[in-house]
């Protein structure tokens, strides 16, 4: 049935490498952000939960 199926978009090796590097950069940025939030939470300590009503 699908004998004449087109392959779609095929990335070159340079494009694959660029995509991988971009993905790694995004993952590292996200990891740094998570660590920053965690560190700020530790520095603030239990006072984070004490809020005036």
Image (cartoon, grey):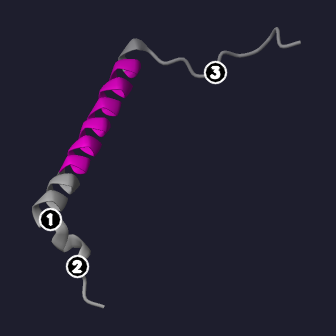
- Which residue is found at the position 29% from the left and 44% from the top? 30
Q: Name the quarter where the N terminus is drawn.
A: top right
Most distant residue in the right direction: 1
**Residue nearer the viewer, 16 or 45:** 45
Establish if 20 lies above or below 52.
Answer: above
Q: Is residue 27 magenta?
A: yes
Quadrant of residue 16 within the rendered picture: top left
Which residue is tagged 2?
Answer: 50
Classify mark 1: helix, strand or loop: helix
The majority secondary structure of the magenta stretch comes to helix
Of callouts 2 and 3, the N-terminal one: 3
Left or right, residue 9 beside residue 41:
right
Q: CA distance from mark 2 to mark 3?
A: 56 Å
Which residue is tagged 1?
Answer: 45
- Tag shown at residue 8: 3
- Which residue is found at the position 22% from the left and 56% from the top? 37
Quadrant of residue 48 within the rendered picture: bottom left
Establish if 7 lies above or below 35.
Answer: above
Q: CA distance from mark 2 to mark 1?
A: 10 Å
Of callouts 1 and 3, the N-terminal one: 3
Magenta region, residue range: 15-35
């Amino acid at each position: 049935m699908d004998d004449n199926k087109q392959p779609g978009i095929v990335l070159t090796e340079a494009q694959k490498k660029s995509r991988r590097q971009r993905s790694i950069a995004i993952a590292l940025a996200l990891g740094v952000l998570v660590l920053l939030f965690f560190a700020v939470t530790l520095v603030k300590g239990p006072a984070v939960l004490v809020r005036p009503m």
